[in-house]
Image (tube, rainbow, N blue to C red):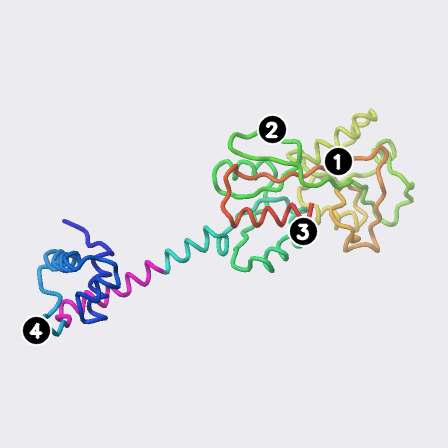
Amino acid sequence: MREISLDRLRTLVTIADNGSFAEAARILHLAPPTVSLHVQELEDRIGAPLLSRKRGNIRPTSVGEALLFRARRLLAETEQALDDLQRQVQGLEGRVRLGASTGVLAHLLPQALEVLARQHPSIDVQVAVLTSQDTLTGLADGALDIGLVALPQPAVAGLVIKPWRRDPIRAFLPATWQCPTFVTPKWLAGRPLILNDSTTRLSRLTAEWFARAGERPEARIELNYNDAIRSLVAAGYGAALLPQESDRPPAQEARVITRALRPAMWRQLGIAHVAQVDRSTQYALDVLWSLR
């Protein structure tokens, strides 16, 4: 069974709106015989006359009226769908799926999201809280468009991974402790520790920092949520090593102090994305790069 094409429906609607085959041909830039053929094909497909041609007055039949009602709605929905897609291709609308850790989301992304919302308000950014490894997996599987990941990372086929920003790692300590100006591995190893869990890049960096000084301390607790770690530090439960992701002091500043490390330690973040991105994703990338 042959399908009804949108071109035939558009021809029928134009004839009905203008009451003339010749005018429809002019508007649609078609030859008059082509307009007549479109109507004939529709009538053959429906099995009934669609237009009445009495005394030069062209009017829809009852069947034609029923088809016109549906044709107008279908053509309008098609035009809207094409317009929506074109706006998405142009980057005026769209969706960007982004994966990042909790610390990055809390301290680095808000400014980027604010700028993107101001410059491109019709782009919907969907954020997922993920580890760097899960973020890269999501990108490779097509479930994400952008990932903010800890570096270094092994190369992944089809993905672009570039350095984004470098943040110092500092010691976060209960304010009740007597602390030196600079925190060393030897001094910190003798204190109760709240560390990131072993699945994170920060955990590996921390272990290497202690190991270079010959220290292998045991954590009192391991977590993968930096704000929870800061809260435990504020409660006096232990000390933590965390990236300084913001120039603002921690929310519990009265109960938490920070100290620089000696030797210094840094956390490198990168931006990962697929090689070919749409315009919405590119706009989001441009904003992130501007805030590096």
- Give the CA distance from mark 1 to mark 2: 28 Å
Residue under numbered circle 1: 219
Q: Which mark is nearer the camera, 4 or 2?
A: 4
Residue 62 in the magenta stretch? The answer is yes
Name the secondary structure under disc 3: helix
Callout 4, which amino acid? Lys
Q: Residue at x 71, y 49 (%)?
A: 227
Q: How much space separates mark 3 and mark 1, taking CA atoms?
A: 24 Å
- Of 172 and 42, nearer the camera is 42
Real-space Cα separation, disc 4 to disc 1, in angstroms: 92 Å
**Residue under circle 2?**
154
- Viewer-nearest of discs 4 and 3: 4
Q: Which mark is residue 106?
A: 3
Kindly check if marks 1 and 2 are in contact, taking CB atoms under 8 A apart as contact: no
Looking at the rendered structure, which numbered label has been put on residue 54? 4
**Corner quadrant of residue 239:** top right
